[in-house]
């Protein structure tokens, strides 16, 4: 996510809206992600895991937190709402890289 | 005069640094997160110190206590390395299957969620509101674990 934030101008230039989704409440996101960490893209809160469940990304009783959270995943969606690219990682420590994501934006119409 | 085995102590402290710098420092950047080469370098240096510390402790004139202590310190270092590798490469893959996650070519499920200004936002809105003063070419959804 830090890599995406660092390259955010490239995403915006490519016409891509970046959105982070987690179980964190809006207060927690405001404090830690926006004020402290300095992220500037859009954050959405899903504390009840409604959307996370609809996307089948629930990581129930995750080991480090003991809570139900979202597993890491990235989706690139075109204006018609169709998924054009996705990465649902097989390892928690391996996420999509900003270069990979920027490359993937080329598949969009 | 009895001198402390500084090699063992340095190796011991360095292996702690090598292990704990992963979750606190090197997990931040993808280049040091996906493969913990920075931590492996630190462990390598730690093991050099542990090796020389062990060699010193096992000199015949040294007391049994220092032999035991230095062996424990070295074993602890190896254990820390094993634990780090286990966490990244084994526990890291303990993720649920997610077979129902939307596939390429499928419609992304619609949603309404709250943004950081406490306003409700729909996927349809995200897909139509302008980016860079133009209609967006797409939306990148990043699902993440939340703040640690």
Image: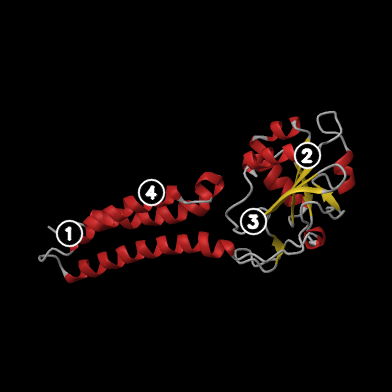
Residue A99: quadrant of the picture = top right
Q: Nearer the viewer, mark 4 or mark 1?
A: 4
Which chain letter matches label 3? A
Q: For mark 1, what is the residue?
A: B56
Q: Residue furthest left?
A: B61
What residue is shown at x 87% (from left), y 33% (from top)? B135
What residue is shown at x 89% (from left), y 39% (from top)? B128
Check if mark 3's residue and mark 4's residue have beta carbons within 8 Å. Answer: no
- Distance between mark 4 and mark 1 Cα atoms: 23 Å
Check if mark 4's residue and mark 1's residue have beta carbons within 8 Å. Answer: no
Q: Earlier in the sequence, mark 4 or mark 1?
A: 4
How far across and down, in percent of the image, does residue B20 sit?
46, 55
Residue at mark 4 shares a chain with residue at mark 1: yes
Res A108 label: 2
Q: Which quarter shows the N terminus of chain B? A: bottom left
- Number of residues whose C-alpha sits closer than 10 Å to that of mark 3, classed few (under 14), some (14–19) or many (20 or more): some
- Distance between mark 3 and mark 4 Cα atoms: 26 Å
- Distance between mark 2 and mark 3 Cα atoms: 21 Å
Q: For mark 3, what is the residue?
A: A89
Image position of B72 (left or right of B84) = left
How far across and down, in percent of the image, does residue B88 sit?
52, 59
What residue is shown at x 50% (from left), y 47% (from top)? B32
Image position of B45 (left or right of B115) = left
Check if mark 1's residue and mark 3's residue have beta carbons within 8 Å. Answer: no
Q: For mark 4, what is the residue?
A: B41
- Distance between mark 1 and mark 2 Cα atoms: 64 Å
């Amino acid at each position: 996510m830090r890599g995406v934030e660092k390259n955010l101008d490239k995403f915006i230039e490519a016409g891509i809206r970046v959105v982070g989704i987690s179980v964190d409440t809006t207060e927690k996101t405001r404090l830690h992600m926006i004020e402290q960490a300095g992220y500037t893209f859009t954050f959405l809160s899903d504390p009840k895991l409604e959307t996370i469940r609809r996307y089948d990304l629930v990581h129930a009783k995750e080991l480090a937190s003991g809570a139900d959270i979202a597993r890491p995943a990235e989706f690139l969606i075109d204006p018609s709402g169709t998924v054009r690219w996705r990465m649902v990682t097989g390892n928690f420590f391996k996420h999509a890289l900003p270069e990979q994501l920027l490359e993937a934006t080329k598949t969009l119409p | 005069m009895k001198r402390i085995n500084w090699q063992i102590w340095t190796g011991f402290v360095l292996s702690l640094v090598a292990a704990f710098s992963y979750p606190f420092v090197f997990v931040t950047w993808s280049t040091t997160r996906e493969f913990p080469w920075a931590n492996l370098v630190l462990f390598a240096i730690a093991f050099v110190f542990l090796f020389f510390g062990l060699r010193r402790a096992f000199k015949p004139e040294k007391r049994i206590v220092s032999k035991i202590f230095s062996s424990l310190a070295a074993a602890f270092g190896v254990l820390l390395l094993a634990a780090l590798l286990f966490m990244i490469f084994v526990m890291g893959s303990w993720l649920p299957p997610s077979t129902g996650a939307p596939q390429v070519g499928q419609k992304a499920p619609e949603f309404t969620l709250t943004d950081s200004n406490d306003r409700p936002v729909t996927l349809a809105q995200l897909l139509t509101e302008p980016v860079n003063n133009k209609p967006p070419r797409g939306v990148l959804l990043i699902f993440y674990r939340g703040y640690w």
